[in-house]
Image (cartoon, rainbow, N blue to C red):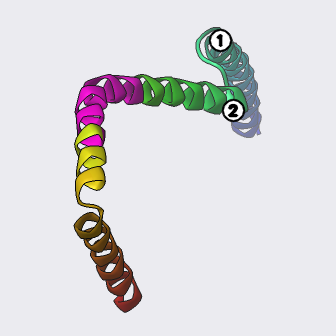
Amino acid sequence: MEAIKDKYGGLLLMEEELLKELENLREENKILRDSLVEVRTDGQPEGDDKLKSLVQEFNGMLHSTLEKAKETLGPGTDKLTETLSRQMAENPVPLLLAAFGVGFLTGHGLNHK
């Protein structure tokens, strides 16, 4: 009978120790979760704010790239416009026929795809 009481007493003692350990783990888990929330809020924006900031950053990079391309291509496009204007004034018919031909071939190619 004493062996049974010792066995059950030992089980009850183990159960109490396991419950204490479980409570300690819960407290540590809460501390870790709280610290994770602090890190998230301190660092970068969450959800929609993060998406908005990424879109704004991408928009800024795209805008700066387009400005650089415009500066680089500016003199070439001015020269091309001047040359085409002179050609149009001197010989308008061949230039119009060439433009018509390119438009026709482009339209014909798009219709087949």
* Res. 21 mark: none
Q: Quadrant of the N terminus?
A: top right
Q: Amino acid at mark 2?
A: Gly
Q: Which residue is found at the position 29% from the left and 54% from the top?
A: 88
Q: Which residue is found at the position 32% from the left and 83% from the top?
A: 109
Tell me if residue 55 comes above or below residue 108 in the rendering: above
Q: Looking at the picture, tell me which residue is in the foreground, 54 or 88.
A: 88
Q: Which class describes the residues within 10 Å of circle 2: few (<14), some (14-19), or many (20+)?
A: few
Is 76 one of the magenta-colored residues? yes
Tell me if residue 18 comes above or below residue 40 in the rendering: below
- Residue 58: where, in percent of width, then height? 49, 30
* Res. 47 mark: 2
In the displayed image of the protein, which residue is found farthest to the front?
90
Element assignment for label 2:
helix
User: Quarter of the image holding residue 108?
Assistant: bottom left
Q: Is residue 51 left or right of residue 74?
A: right
Element assignment for label 1:
helix
Q: Amino acid at mark 1?
A: Ser
Number of numbered discs visible in the structure rendering: 2
Which of the two discs, 2 and 1, sits closer to the camera? 2
User: Quarter of the image holding residue 9?
Assistant: top right
Question: Whole-Å distance between the Cαs marked 2 and 1?
Answer: 19 Å
- Residue 49: where, in percent of width, then height? 69, 26
Query: Magenta region's main secondary structure?
Result: helix
Q: In the rendered structure, which disc, 2 or 1, sits on the residue that comes first in sequence?
A: 1
Q: Looking at the picture, tell me which residue is in the foreground, 12 or 26.
A: 26
Tell me where the magenta segment starts and ends, as one range. Answer: 65-81
Q: Quadrant of the C terminus?
A: bottom left
Q: Which residue is mark 1?
A: 35
